[in-house]
Amino acid sequence: MVFKEKEFTLGEKSILLRSARTDEAQLLVDYLKDVCGETRFLLCDADEIEYTAESEEDFIEDKNSSEDSMLMLAFVDGEYAGNCSFQPIGTRRRAKHRADIGIALYQKYTGFGLGRLMLEQLLGKIKELGYEQAELTVVGGNDRAYRLYESLGFKECGRIPNANKYQDGTYADDIHMVKELNR
Ligand SMILES: CC(C)(COP(=O)(O)OP(=O)(O)OC[C@H]1O[C@@H](n2cnc3c(N)ncnc32)[C@H](O)[C@@H]1OP(=O)(O)O)[C@@H](O)C(=O)NCCC(=O)NCCS
């Protein structure tokens, strides 16, 4: 689905939230490589990102035309800052009430409330669509993300110990969190 442009102010910064355009495909591929290189809290290392502008263009089109998923971009003072998204956790009927959420901002745009603002807007859409719960996975040690999710009503419901093994030989858990939307 398309998220219609919405403007906000956070402190001195002007924020624009909207869906992606297909001509932003390369921007999104570059961003994925950059954010994966900036933090160990995302899915993979930067060199494992294999998306191309063509595959990302299809992804944007799919998201914008979908009835049950959405991709939302954030711009801070006109600069692309990151995105968040949701989709059903599975295609089978019995999993269709569960929305899976993801979010990642460039480090320079973290820590001033943008993540909270984006997730509040995203959760609004998820609820509007009739999903009954929102779910996400956060890597152990990502305290900023964990705190934010907790304050938005997500509760920890399980951990996979040592789910992530890094090239330096260290490990981190995956923490599953759920927010019930109708209670
Ligand atoms: C995780 C992320 C989306 C959070 O967005 P954000 O804009 O930085 O977060 P916000 O500023 O809206 O809020 C963060 C909350 O954590 C708190 N916080 C900030 N730094 C913190 C820290 N180092 N430790 C614990 N809490 C911290 C803030 O006080 C704030 O709480 P509040 O709203 O009650 O005051 C963003 O930092 C990000 O994209 N990081 C990189 C990628 C990533 O980790 N993605 C999440 C994968 S699950």
Image (cartoon, rainbow, N blue to C red):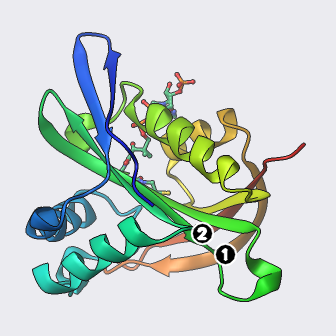
Q: Is residue 12 visible?
A: yes
**Number of numbered discs present?**
2
> Viewed as shown, does residue 106 lie left or right of 114?
left
Ligand 1 quadrant in view: top left
**Going 61% across and 41% down the picture, which residue do you hit?**
124
Residue position for label 2:
173
- Check disc 1 and report its element: helix, strand or loop: strand
Q: Nearer the viewer, residue 141 or 17?
A: 17
Element marked by disc 2:
strand
Task: Indicate the quadrant containing the C terminus: top left, top right, bottom left or bottom right.
Answer: top right
Q: Is residue 109 left or right of residue 164?
A: left
Amino acid of disc 2: Asp
The residue nearer to you, when weighing 175 against 170, is 175
Within-10-Å neighbours for mark 2: few <14, some 14–19, many 20+:
some
Q: Is residue 146 visible?
A: no
Is the residue marked by circle 1 packed among few (<14), some (14-19), or many (20+) residues within 10 Å? few
Pinpoint residue 57: horizontal percent, then vertical percent. Answer: 20, 77
Q: Do the CB atoms of the residues marked 1 and 2 lie less than 8 Å apart?
A: yes
- Position of 67 relative to 143 (above/below): below
Along the horizontal axis of the image, is 173 left or right of 79? right
Q: Position of residue 58 (x, y in %)?
A: 26, 81
The three-letter code of the residue at mark 1 reads: Pro
Residue 88: image location, x then y, percent: 62, 73
* Between discs 1 and 2, the one toward the N terminus: 1
- Label for residue 149? none
For the point 61% across and 62% down, which residue is it? 136
Query: On the image, which quarter does residue 20 sit in?
Result: bottom left
Task: Quickly name the residue at label 1.
Answer: 161
